[in-house]
Amino acid sequence: VFNYKWYVPLSYYTDLNNEEETVWLNMTDVKFEVDPNIEWLKGNVNQSGFYRVTYDEEMWNSIIAALKRNHSVFNSADRASLIDDAFTLCRAGILNITIVLDLTQYLQRERDYVPWATALEHFQAWSKYLSESAPYRLFLQYMKYLLAPVSQSLGWEDNGTHMHKLMRSDILASAVLCDVEETVKQAKSKFNSWMNSETRIPPNLREVVYSAGIKYGGVKEWEYCWTKYMSSGVPSERKLLLRVLGVASDPWLLQRYLLKTLDRDKVRPQDIEVVIQTVASNPEGRLLAWRHLKAHWSTLQGFFGNGTFTMGSLISAGTSHFSTEYDYREVASFFKKLNVGSGSRSLEQSLETIQLNIHWVKHNEEVLYKWLINNLDR
């Protein structure tokens, strides 16, 4: 530990002066004056500095109120940085989860890609931590509440700018996974047209459509996509199909899918991580992926050996979503008697991640549940 200290340029603007100002934080701290009549101050303009910014509760609430009134008072990059800082500080135990939730309410009216991409990344992480906790179903309802108006606004026409197309793909994919009814209905219809009539699906919408067909379909839909995977000569299409095959709702299909990773003629060794990761990301498949990793560890180790980092990646893929003390003890106990070789650092990081997940859920579960009950009833 070197105890280095740095001079840091802090840029900011306020509701009374939208011109960017910069002050230099010296190697300990600094004080600077602003107009006492301001409602809010936004630090780290355009997220140009490599640091986090937090505010006192009153200032956070003023920023949230401004976002709800007219979110365009902050540009897209600053809205994204507010979201990213809030979620990250909450993960670190520095910011109350209710501030984060209040902040996200404005997203119903957000139509820019970067803030939504930032929020979705954090929401997906929350979904993993919460999948076995009391607020999980309510959390999915809240996601539907946020996503429904945005997905309806974006529509299904594959048009607009590159960023607009990216946003449509991400929003519709999340809406499908959260069971936004109208989005699922449209996606299933397009999947059936593709399966029955080979109707072309625009590349930007394929993941959305394939996911809906597999998640809300059955064996027939799953087998159709598996056949497409086996026959496709396009690497990007094969990788996409590998990902979506893991979103099935039937545990039997997921178990059969995992077993295919043991056959090199069906799943290439370099793609095994994709399969385990996508099944482990599915609430219906998380324990299946972990059981598969345990049951076939020696076989998988035979594919890669102890000298590669792939085994470490498999450990991370199969365990990083766990959030209970029981899971932590089971993972630690299983690997305690094994030589994981170059995967030892990944194992340490995975155990640290599980502990962080446990702490986060314990600290936030009850507060989150109460907030969702109060706000979804409005």
Image (cartoon, rainbow, N blue to C red):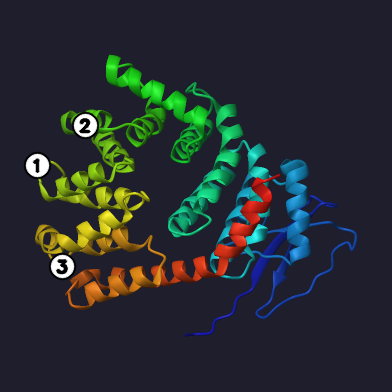
Q: Nearer the viewer, residue 2 or 152?
A: 152
Quarter holding the C terminus is: top right
Q: How far across and down, in percent of the image, does residue 337 sit?
A: 18, 78
Q: Which is more toward the observer, 220 or 193?
A: 220
**Dot 2: element:** helix
Q: Which mark is residue 180?
A: none
Marks 3/1 in contact by CB < 8 Å: the verdict is no
Q: Residue at x 52, y 46 (%)?
A: 140
Q: Nearer the viewer, mark 2 or mark 3?
A: 2
- Tell me the residue that label 3 is attached to: 307
- The residue wearing badge 2 is 223
Q: Amino acid at mark 1?
A: Asp
Q: Which comes sooner in the sequence, label 2 or label 1?
A: 2
Q: Is residue 125 left or right of residue 49?
A: left
Q: Nearer the viewer, residue 285 or 171?
A: 285
Which residue is label 1 attached to? 265
Q: CA distance from mark 2 to mark 1?
A: 17 Å
**Percent position (x, y) of residue 243?**
30, 42
Q: Name which residue type carries label 2.
A: Glu
Secondary structure beneath dot 1 equals loop
